[in-house]
Amino acid sequence: MSSLELIKEKVKELVEPIIKDNFMEIADIELYKSGNYHLKVVIDKLKGSVSLDDCAKISEQIALELDMNDVIPERYFLEVSSPGTDRPLKKNEDFRRFKGQRVKIVLHQLVNSQPAYTGYIQEVTDDKVMIENEGKITEISFSDIKKANLDTAEDDLKKRG
């Protein structure tokens, strides 16, 4: 495991209780170094949406916890945000929660000669998600998924048109 991955794991251990204590969950954590470290923590609520006040409150608590534990070895930039309309789907539970919604999935390798799929989540098992696009169902193993996000682009076009 790289040093960035180790730091990211330690960050997750420290911030997850803070977020849970505030009745939220971690949607994503990103950590990269470009000059200074940049830590992005994406939070979500099971019911309702994340407000700017929620982000500010969680940001203060996370910064205090990380500084007290000296997790990130240098100066860092902390960003706490909501998942937005193109929310990343990371866990099996995310796919279950958004069953029926449109999703875009990018794959590690080709599945049926395609590098990516867009469609509606139909079913979710422990190791696969079935998506429907134009009447065709495609089964995709979670192990084949590189990145998945809710895809609201088509819904936005319908609203405008």
Image: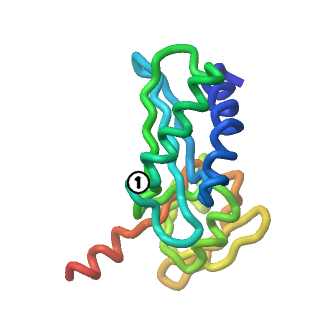
> Viewer-proximal residue, 156 or 78?
78
Q: Is residue 109 visible?
A: no
Q: Is residue 103 visible?
A: yes
* Residue at (63% x, 67% y) in the render: 95
Question: Is 8 drawn above or below residue 160 in the view shown?
Answer: above
> Viewer-proximal residue, 36 or 113?
36
Asked whether, in this view, residue 117 is left or right of residue 122, the answer is left
> Viewer-proximal residue, 74 or 64?
64
Question: Is 13 drawn above or below residue 34 in the view shown?
Answer: below
Question: Is 22 drawn above or below residue 6 in the view shown?
Answer: below
**Secondary element at image label 1:** helix
* Residue at (61% x, 56% y) in the render: 25
Q: Position of residue 143 (x, y in %)?
A: 71, 52
Q: Position of residue 49 (x, y in %)?
A: 46, 66
Asked whether, in this view, residue 131 is left or right of residue 141, the answer is left
> Viewer-proximal residue, 93 or 142?
93
Colour theme: rainbow
Q: Which residue of the protein is positioned furthest toward the right in this rendering?
A: 126
* Residue at (46% x, 56% y) in the render: 83
The residue under label 1 is which amino acid type? Asp
Q: Position of residue 46 (x, y in %)?
A: 59, 68
Provide the residue designation for mark 1: 53
Asked whether, in this view, residue 40 is left or right of residue 23, the answer is left
Badge 1 crowding class, 10 Å Cα cut-off, few under 14, some 14 to 19, many 20 or more, is few
* Residue at (47% x, 82% y) in the render: 134
Asked whether, in this view, residue 5 is left or right of residue 76, the answer is right
Image quadrant holding the N terminus, namely: top right
Image quadrant holding the C terminus, namely: bottom left
Q: Position of residue 31 (x, y in %)?
A: 53, 32
